[in-house]
Image (cartoon, rainbow, N blue to C red):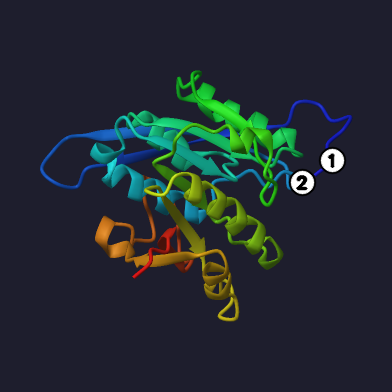
Amino acid sequence: MDHSGAETPSIAYKVFTFEDKKNTPESLCVSIPEVLDPQYGMYVWPCAVVLAQFLWTRREELRGKTLLELGAGVSLPGVVAARCGASVILSDNAETPQCLENCRRSCDANGLGHVTVLGLTWGEVSPDLVLLPKLDIILGSDVFYEPQDFEDILLTVAFLLRKNPSAQFWTTYQERSADWSIEVLLQRWGLTCVDVGLETFGADEAELAGSTLPGNKSILMMIITLKTES
């Protein structure tokens, strides 16, 4: 990911239009900058569109809520949440400034200069993590990508949920291997999850928000919360 000595990367803007398929004309159009460089990997991934669709369908619920997006990258879900009236904090790896810059670029492209961008590294209880304000919702799009990162992600999520017991972690992930599971890790960190069917929020389609995503990828969604004592 080292891009030292490189000039400004080539950027293309992808537009996503979320519409209300009921009997209202309400819609939301957002523009997301993608870095056209294979070393960056800063593209809109299928999981992001699905999570953004979920947020769009819950837009009334988001107004006035405080959200944190983990591993935001190009930040489509966080941008949609902010445009829907949520107070949003975008975060990505503190050691990858180019990712944080792309978060800021996405905000600028959508008139969201007030959105905070933070460097948060999964698995590290940093001062910035500790000093976060009260959270209502945590977002994660395709953060369960590399199995070696799963525990660090859930450590961070568990820390945040213990600090905010009524909060929820909304996450989408792509099914890449039947052998990958976070069930044991959820138990270890005192967490539980509920699957959310894509058909319940109009995301069981190959093309969402006027894009060609998620295509034929197998995308799943779940909501993770603190396990309560029965």
Q: Name the residue located 62 percent from the left edge and 61 percent from the top edge.
A: 145
Q: Is residue 108 left or right of residue 42?
A: left
Residue 58 visible in the displayed image: yes
Q: Which of 135 and 16 is in front in this view?
A: 135
Q: Which of 73 and 137 is in front in this view?
A: 137
Give percent across and percent down for residue 155: 61, 56
- Residue contact between numbered discs 1 and 2, judged by CB atoms under 8 Å: yes
Give percent across and percent down for residue 39: 76, 46
Q: Hey, which quadrant is residue 154 in on the image? A: bottom right
Give percent across and percent down for residue 28: 31, 33
Residue of label 1:
2
Q: Which mark is residue 39?
A: 2
Q: Residue 230 carries which label?
A: none
Q: Nearer the viewer, residue 119 or 39?
A: 119
Judge the density around disc 1: few (<14), some (14-19), many (≥20) Cα neighbours within 10 Å. few
Mark 1 vs 2, N-terminal side: 1
Q: In this view, does 58 lie to the left or right of 47?
A: left
Q: Name the residue located 66 percent from the left edge and 49 percent from the top edge.
A: 122
Residue farthest to the front? 229
